[in-house]
Image: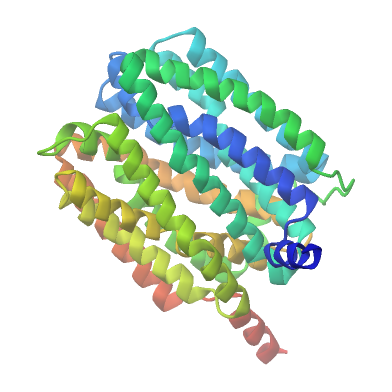
Amino acid sequence: MKERIKRITDFLGLKRSIVGLLAMVVLLGMGERMAERFLPIYIMALGGGAIAIGILSGLTNLLGALYSFPGGYLADRIGTKRSLLVFNAMAIGGYLIVIAVPSWQAVIIGSILFLSWTAISLPATMGLVSQVLPKNKRTMGVTLHSLVRRFPMALGPVIGGFFITFWGEREGVRYAFICALALAAVSAIAQQVLIEDSGKKNEATAGPFSMFALMSPALKRLLIADILIRFCEQIPAAFVVVWCMKAITHPVSAVRFGVLTSVEMATAILIYIPVAYFADKGSKKPFVVMTFVFFTLFPVTLWLSHSFVPLIFAFVIRGLKEFGEPTRKALIMDLAPENRKAAMFGTYYLLRDVVVTVGAFGGALLWNIGPAVNLFTAFAFGCAGTIWFALKGSDLSAEQRAAAGAS
């Protein structure tokens, strides 16, 4: 029995620090998703309109960009364990603001802190995976991180939907933030107990421009494709819940929207481990291309869905967009310099999300023109990104072959 458990843990790369990381992801993610998924509805209930929702969507991407590099830089300077504690405290501060002041302006201000969690901590978590696991287990480690994230992403909106059903759109979301605050506090304790501090500090660079100079051509080509695909994702992102609960012929309830989110996450969970196993064995490019295809299909599928049953199919497509997402993150780490992975990861996301912020803000303007304009513009960007990477993209093995030929 012990031997079987050891084989499973070795296969999955479940070392103590990884277990601590996963516990943190579940606790913080559950609280975050109970409330964050319904933020556009909450803003509308507090008197905000489409422009306020667009500001929130744009801030999500802008903060993701601005926080990514300092997140990686801080992780390289003070270590993963200490940096994660700092990031956790920021999220707690954001929750306190939203709980204390029930206005849409306070939501925007608080979001500057609690929306930072994923963006600012991602370089540190990816750096931790690189430190703890060998190269042939990194895709599995990133996949396990992504898979476990989907459990709170699936369950959180369902619970949040029940909160809204029982207490209304205003108080229900506010109570969800109170739960998020409590779970974040527990997460801070868990991560400090379980994550081991290696004491290793990587060399941190002076700024993102010097890191960009170290970026390989293959990583730059991936970055271009990723930017186009994120335009496809972010142009309609904040309005998906509005489409489902307000705009379509047969709108769905908050609980049913939570169920749709669960369908999306369950789909992603089912494909993660098999894809990770095969991606670690060979070329990562086909898996990344497939995930870009599903990103592209979602806006059109959503446009065709005007009741609950067709929306289930649309959200299955949305779940399938995670087909190669962990593989893409593992590819970024593969192509990054070995001693500066957190900083390079943060630089990549800084450059990507600064540009994509334009699409997130522009999504509100396109939505005001019409949902069709918003969704089909997103589809066009998805087509461009998928075709670019299919023609120009490469992975680590291709880079190694090119280097060997040059020498």
Towards the viewer: 241 or 72: 241
Q: Position of residue 171 (x, y in %)?
A: 38, 13
Q: Residue visible at 74% across and 34% down?
A: 190
Q: Residue furthest front?
A: 1
Q: Position of residue 79 (x, y in %)?
A: 81, 42
Image quarter where the N terminus lies is: bottom right
Image quarter where the C terminus lies is: bottom right
Q: Position of residue 132 (x, y in %)?
A: 78, 57
Q: Residue furthest right?
A: 199
Q: Quadrant of residue 337?
A: bottom right
Q: Residue visible at 28% across and 40% down?
A: 240
Towards the viewer: 396 or 80: 80
Q: Is residue 396 left or right of residue 268?
A: right
Q: Residue visible at 34% across and 62% down?
A: 294
Q: Residue visible at 65% across and 48% down?
A: 123
Colouring scheme applied when the structure was drawn: rainbow
Q: Is residue 307 left or right of residue 166?
A: left
Q: Is residue 236 left or right of residue 319?
A: left
Asked if residue 115 can be seen in this view, the reply is: no
54 is higher (above) or lower (below) than 317:
above
Q: Is residue 64 left or right of residue 358?
A: right
Asked if residue 94 can be seen in this view, the reply is: yes
7 is higher (above) or lower (below) than 229:
below
For the image, the number of numbered tags is: 0
